[in-house]
Structures are given as C-alpha cells and as structure tokens.
C-alpha cells in the first residue's frame, strides 16, 4: 500500500527542483554544443546524470508499530536512512509517534525524510555531561569518561575543552561506537588533543537531524523539539534541530522546529537550500541560520518567533531570497552583515522585535559589510525600544536599496526612528517608503 503523500505526482512536487528528493536529477540537455538531447533515458551503469523518471521508488517506514522498522529511537531512524541511502535513494516515512533520540540522525544523499506533521514528534534526551578521566591525543580514536557518566554505545556526543597550546575553546562532535568499561571508541579520530589540563568535558548535545557533504535531500512534515529547558546551549555553528554542513540542493518544507537551546535550522556552506512553510520558534539562538558561504538560499513563507534572531544572514551569504516570512517577537527580526551581498528581502512582516526590526551589522569596515542588497515591500510594526530604529543600517554598508516598505509605530513616538543610516554608509537609496508614528522618520548619523 502506498502511504499518503507518496504518489508519483506528490513525490515529484516535493523536491528541490521539480524532481523527487531521492531521485537522481535529469540532465538539462544543455551541453553548449550540438549533441542531441536525451529524450528516452535508460538506467545505465554508473550514469547518474540522466535517469528515467521512475513511477515508484523505495519507501521504508519507521514507527512504534506496524512499520518496516519498529522503533522510535535514533538508531531505528538511522537504520532506515542508511538502508534507503545505500540503495540509491527514496523515502523514509516516519509514522505518528514520539521519537526520543540519544544521537543525531545522519542523512544520506537522495533520501527524503517524511513525517505526518504534528503527529511525528522528535525530541532528545536531557543533556548530561562528564569529565574525561584520561588524556587522549590528536591521533587517538577513543576517550575515557569519569565513572557515572551515563553514556551508551550509539550516543552522539559533543566534546568541549580549552586548546592545550593556545587556550582557545575546542568543540568536537563524535559518535560512540564501542565500549569497554568507561573507555569508548569513536566513529572518527579526534584530530585534536584532549588533555586533562584543558579541562575537557563530554556532553549529550547534538542536532536532531544532520548531514555533511550530501546533496539532493528533503525533510518534510516533521515536528522537531530540542527540549530547551533540559539541555545546555550548543550554538548554531555546531547544532540545531536541523544542522547541515557542506551540502547542496536541500528542501525543508512544512517542518516545525522548536525549543532548541541554540538554533532552529542552521546550514553552513550549503548551496541552493530551500526552506518553505516552516515554523522555527522559541530558540535561544537563531530561527533560520543561512550560514557562512551559503549561496542562493530561498527562505519563503516561514514563521519565526520567540528567537534571539528570526533570520540571520551569517557570513558571505549571497544571491538569496527571503520573502513572505513572518518574524514575530524575536529580539532581532532580520540581521544581515559580513559580506552578505546581492540578496533580496521582500514582502516579509516583521513585528514586535525587542531590539530592532532589520539590522545591517557594522562588521569590521566597509569591505566586510553587506552591500548591494534590496529591501522592498516589507511591513515593520512596533519594533524595538523607546530609542530604537526599526531599520538600522550600520557600519560602512554601501549600495543598498530600501523601497516600498511600510514602517509603523503604534505605541508612542518616544525617541524612536523609522530608518537610521550610519555615518559611514554610502549610496543607501530610500524610495517610496511609508513611515508613520515615529519621532523621526529618517535619521542620518554624522
């Protein structure tokens, strides 16, 4: 029986680029030369460029009962992901139920992870920690924990220490794959020295879903809860409800990410990531974190609320589009800065921000700032304190267009500013904006 939502038409519609996540993408037949297009593709050994559009692909179900794999642990979900991924791709269907993870699920290329919305609820164990009871060198692939640690084989861990040579913090993520007493083997070598003089500790902290150097995946119709009240903080450079590193062609749709003591959805050096119709709420860090070097993110129709920052353009995020999102009750609605150039932010609604609606960060000088971005047709209502600016363009930001936006303040004018331009900013074009209820509509510093 084909589960709901797994028809051929539905599968195709769910993908990153109108082909199924889990299917090998067909070639565009634009080689730049005179070869004829591929009109009747066949499955051919080791050819991943062109493949038939199959009516059905592999689906493996996971759930508390009546599933191909019965279980609600990260091990059960990982087993399904590995099985489908090793056979070239398809869908892992998570049936209704509560899934409690002791470790991250590591995703595979060409695999779609599909749930049943609010009925598929994924959370994690409360974090706990241990000191290391012995030194481990950079070439080691094992650790010794202090007695009473509570860790198990299969767990994901986060190692924290001060660098034994320079004193800077070290953070490392690994999985425990074998054990003798309090000694554990790791899935990968340490590659750093973890010596007792650096006061190393190990923590049950990890993203719920993660991937590294993968492509063509989809995550859909899941509820992810980080159990923020019972977990330590781990920032979005390492974790989140979803954390991706060095990936491409990713679709995240109709996902709820909530209550992580860190970020909601974070992707670092990931290209052509689509995040649509998601909710990312009540995180200690960032609702959506298009991370360093990420090219062409598409962020559309999401609700970001109760976070430190709703949408955070990190470092070198370029050619992105953020539109029709609701940023409500974050400390900062939208933040853009370090070499985040050539992005379009339009038709978003940013309301009730604690500090500022949209900030262009000052960074370290003009060469580091967010140039050539367009901010248009957004609505900003009641953002910041008595002396705040709703749109605050700081540092040496240049060549930014702010047009057709509506900025409203319904509380009181106080010392509030609609748009504030820093003294080092250049070529900031303000056109056709409607500003009302502020003490000053526009302030140019210096």
Image (tube, helix red, strand yellow):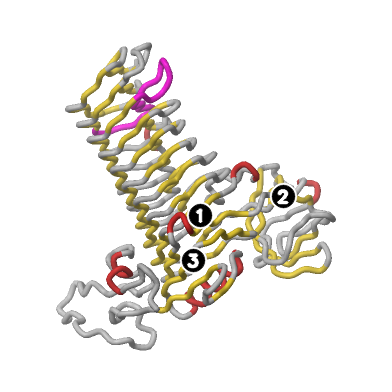
Q: Earlier in the sequence, mark 2 or mark 3?
A: 3
Which element type, helix, strand or loop, lies under badge 2?
A: loop
Left or right side of 173 for 202: right
Question: Is residue 31 in view from this perspective?
Answer: no
* Camera-side mark, 2 or 3: 3
Give the residue at x 32% y 20%: 409
Mark 1 vs mark 2, CA separation in Å: 21 Å
Give the residue at x 77% y 56%: 150
Mark 2 vs mark 3, CA separation in Å: 27 Å
Location of residue 307 with respect to 155 vertically, above or below: above
Which element type, helix, strand or loop, lies under badge 3?
A: strand
Location of residue 340 with respect to 191 vertically, above or below: above
- Identify residue for label 1: 243
Q: Measuring from the top left, give residue 114's x and y in whole percent.
A: 43, 64
Are there few (<14), some (14-19), or many (20+) residues within 10 Å of tag 3? many
Q: Measuring from the top left, give residue 132's x and y in whole percent.
A: 79, 53
User: Which residues lie in the magenta part?
Assistant: 382-401
Most extreme residue toward the front, as rendered?
66
The reply to whether dot 1 and dot 2 touch (C-beta < 8 Å) is no
Which element type, helix, strand or loop, lies under badge 1?
A: strand
- Identify residue for label 3: 94
Are there few (<14), some (14-19), or many (20+) residues within 10 Å of tag 2? some
Q: Which mark is residue 128?
A: 2
Question: Is 386 inside the magenta-drawn segment?
Answer: yes
* Camera-side mark, 3 or 1: 3
């Amino acid at each position: 029986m084909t589960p709901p939502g797994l028809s051929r038409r539905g599968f195709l519609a769910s993908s990153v680029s109108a082909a199924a996540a889990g299917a090998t993408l067909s070639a565009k037949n634009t080689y730049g030369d005179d070869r004829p297009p591929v009109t009747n593709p066949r499955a051919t050994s080791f050819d991943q460029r062109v493949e038939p559009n199959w009516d059905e692909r592999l689906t493996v179900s996971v759930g508390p009962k009546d599933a191909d794999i019965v279980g609600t642990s990260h091990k059960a979900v990982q087993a399904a992901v590995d099985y489908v991924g090793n056979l070239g791709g398809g869908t892992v269907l998570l049936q209704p139920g509560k899934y409690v993870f002791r470790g991250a699920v590591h995703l595979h290329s060409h695999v779609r992870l599909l749930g049943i919305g609010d009925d598929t609820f994924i959370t994690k164990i409360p974090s706990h920690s241990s000191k290391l009871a012995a030194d481990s060198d950079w070439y080691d692939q094992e650790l010794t924990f202090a007695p009473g640690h509570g860790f198990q084989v299969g767990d994901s861990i986060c190692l924290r220490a001060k660098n034994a040579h320079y004193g800077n913090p070290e953070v490392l993520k690994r999985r425990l794959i074998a054990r003798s007493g309090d000694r554990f083997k790791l899935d990968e070598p340490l590659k750093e020295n973890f010596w007792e003089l650096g006061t190393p500790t190990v923590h049950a902290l990890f993203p719920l879903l993660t991937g590294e150097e993968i492509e063509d995946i989809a995550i859909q119709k899941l509820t992810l809860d980080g159990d923020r009240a019972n977990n330590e903080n781990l920032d979005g450079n390492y974790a989140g409800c979803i954390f991706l590193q060095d990936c491409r062609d990713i679709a995240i749709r109709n996902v709820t990410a909530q209550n992580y003591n860190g970020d909601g959805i974070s992707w670092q050096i990931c290209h052509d990531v689509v995040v649509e119709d998601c909710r990312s709420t009540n995180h200690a860090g960032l609702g959506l974190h298009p991370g360093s070097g990420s090219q062409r993110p598409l962020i559309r129709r999401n609700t970001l609320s109760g976070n430190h920052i709703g949408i955070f353009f990190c470092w070198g995020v370029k050619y992105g589009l953020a539109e029709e999102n609701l940023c409500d009750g974050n400390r900062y609605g939208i933040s853009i800065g370090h070499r985040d150039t050539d992005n379009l932010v339009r038709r978003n609604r940013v309301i009730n921000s604690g500090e500022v609606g949209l900030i262009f960060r000052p960074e370290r000088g003009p060469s580091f700032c967010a140039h050539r971005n367009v901010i248009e047709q957004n609505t900003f209502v009641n953002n910041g304190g008595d002396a705040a600016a709703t749109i605050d363009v700081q540092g040496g930001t240049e060549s930014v267009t702010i047009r057709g936006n509506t900025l409203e303040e319904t509380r009181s004018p106080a010392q509030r500013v609609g748009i504030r331009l820093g003294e080092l900013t250049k070529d900031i074009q303000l056109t056709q904006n409607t500003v009302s209820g502020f003490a000053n509509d526009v302030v140019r510093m210096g």
